[in-house]
Amino acid sequence: PYDNIAPRPYPAILATGGLSDPRVTYWEPAKWVARLRPASTSGRPILLKMNMEAGHAGAAGRFDDLKETALEYAFALWAVEHRGAS
């Protein structure tokens, strides 16, 4: 995805990552978001949520996992509600 970034109207994006992820190191989503933000022409938010206690599978505890899922659902609902706004 990093190499395919071009100026275009990207949708609202919530990129997530885990600090202790050995497969996708924390700087990869950060680097992707940093390059994507100035390339987007839509004016929609491109956010990065880095979980400081998670690995590749996300949060470890049941309630922590539910908190992550709630954040993703809330962002998705917000993005659908505001899809026409620029």
Image (cartoon, rainbow, N blue to C red):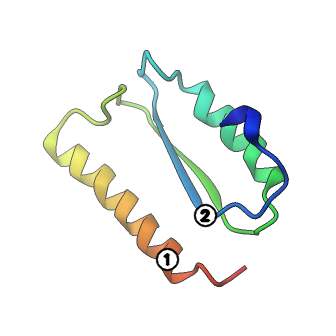
Residue 4 place in picture, x, y as percent: 74, 39
Quarter of the figure that contains the C terminus: bottom right
The vertical placement of 79 against 2, above or below, is below
Q: Which residue lies furthest to the left in this view?
A: 62
Whether residue 85 sits left or right of residue 41 in the image: it is left
Going by the numbered disc 1, the residue's amino acid type is Val
Q: Which residue lies furthest to the front in this view?
A: 4
Whether residue 23 sits left or right of residue 69 in the image: it is right
Whether residue 53 sits left or right of residue 24 in the image: it is left
- The residue singled out by tag 1 in the image is 80
Nearer to the camera, 75 or 53: 75
The vertical placement of 80 against 34, above or below, is below
Quarter of the figure that contains the N terminus: top right
Going by the numbered disc 2, the residue's amino acid type is Ala
Q: Residue furthest top?
A: 22
Residue that appears at 68% across and 37% down: 32
Nearer to the camera, 71 or 24: 24
Residue that appears at 49% across and 77% down: 80
Quadrant of res 61: top left
The answer for how far apart the CA atoms under marks 2 and 1 are is 9 Å
**Mark number, residue 12:** 2
Q: What element carries label 2?
A: loop
Q: Which of marks 2 and 1 is nearer the N terminus?
A: 2
